[in-house]
DNA sequence: CTTCTGCTTAGACGAACTTCTAATCAGCGG
DNA sequence: CCGCTGATTAGAAGTTCGTCTAAGCAGAAG
């Protein structure tokens, strides 16, 4: 990836602390979180995420994924790029094939934000 | 709301069961879930959700919300409509003002889907 | 080196989204 | 009834998004 055009999201930023006990989200936090949710807010990307997560070994080759959709390879590649730039997945080339795997920490963070549980999420309790 | 134009999401559908132990999401499930995530995948709507959830009494008047943004009232109204049609919030008019409150069940469902925990989410464990 | 396969990048196009202004509806008070 | 305030609807403008085709890069094999 020689040319970096899409914004790079710092996945680790703010990932440590349980977000917003119940001070409402400020604009900066919302601006940081929204792109993460946007990345999973697509049927194809949701399924890709699921396919990768559920694949044996916890990782999947692109060739394992394209067959599940009636979409062209470039389109799948595009969606994988979106997920990767959001920090939700990571990838590595091994010889001929490129493998993708989930970054559970980011998913966990998003999950915790939506959890209606004391001190841990968007909703009081 | 005399004219119903935007699609109505059946919030209760599939809300009972822990989603997809680890059979990957099928297309129909993904098509149903993606609009919910899309509804929260916006900085303004994330903050609206948070503001409503954290407001005393668990509900907020529109007039409590508009002040937090540098956006016009119709824009806020639009975002509230999106959240409402996704089933994330509900509302009621009481005299002059309209009050909004969170539907925690839907948020909980989304949270559970992202949870990397056995048998409950997108990610194995 | 050449060719083949796997995957990504580049660019284009139509659909969807966010925001605005202007207009409308709903309730309250003179 | 009339005007005022709170909130929504309608329609338009600009931007972003999802998908495609065509082209390019990376590794393996002849």
Image (cartoon, coloured by chain):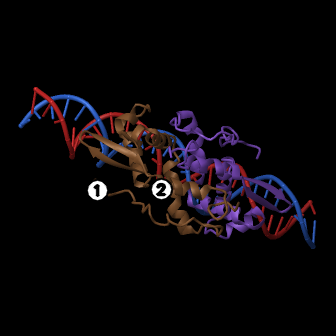
Chain colours: A purple, B brown, C red, D blue
Chain at tag 2: B
Category of crowding for the residue at label 2, using alpha-carbon neighbours closer than 10 angstroms: few (below 14), some (14–19), many (at least 20)? some
Q: Residue at x 38, y 48 (%)?
A: B81
Viewer-proximal residue, D23 or D14? Answer: D14
Residue B104 shown left or right of residue A121 in the figure: left
Chain at tag 1: B
**C5 versus A75 height, above or below:** below
Query: Which residue, given by chain and number where applicable, does mark 1 sit on?
Result: B3
Spot occupied by residue A53 in the image (x, y as percentages of width and height): 70, 61
Q: Residue at x 64, y 65 (%)?
A: B119
Q: CA distance from mark 1 to mark 2?
A: 27 Å
In the image, which is nearer the foreground, mark 1 or mark 2? 2
Residue A49 shown left or right of residue B65 in the figure: right
Q: Residue at x 42, y 60 (%)?
A: B9
Query: Which residue, given by chain and number where applicable, does mark 2 sit on?
Result: B105
Q: Quadrant of residue B22?
A: bottom right
Q: Which label was assigned to residue A16?
A: none
Spot occupied by residue B112 in the image (x, y as percentages of width and height): 58, 57
Spot occupied by residue A13 in the image (x, y as percentages of width and height): 68, 38
């Amino acid at each position: 990836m020689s040319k970096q055009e899409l914004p790079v999201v710092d996945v680790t930023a703010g990932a440590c602390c349980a977000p917003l006990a119940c001070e409402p989200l400020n604009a900066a936090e919302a601006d940081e979180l929204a792109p993460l949710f946007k990345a999973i807010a697509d049927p194809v990307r949701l399924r890709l995420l699921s396919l990768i997560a559920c694949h044996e070994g916890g990782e999947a080759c692109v060739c394992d994924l394209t067959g599940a959709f009636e979409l062209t390879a470039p389109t799948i590649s595009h969606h994988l790029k979106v997920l990767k730039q959001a920090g939700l997945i990571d990838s590595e080339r091994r010889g001929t094939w490129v493998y993708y795997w989930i970054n559970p920490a980011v998913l966990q963070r998003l999950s915790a934000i939506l959890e209606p549980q004391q001190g841990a999420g968007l909703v009081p309790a």
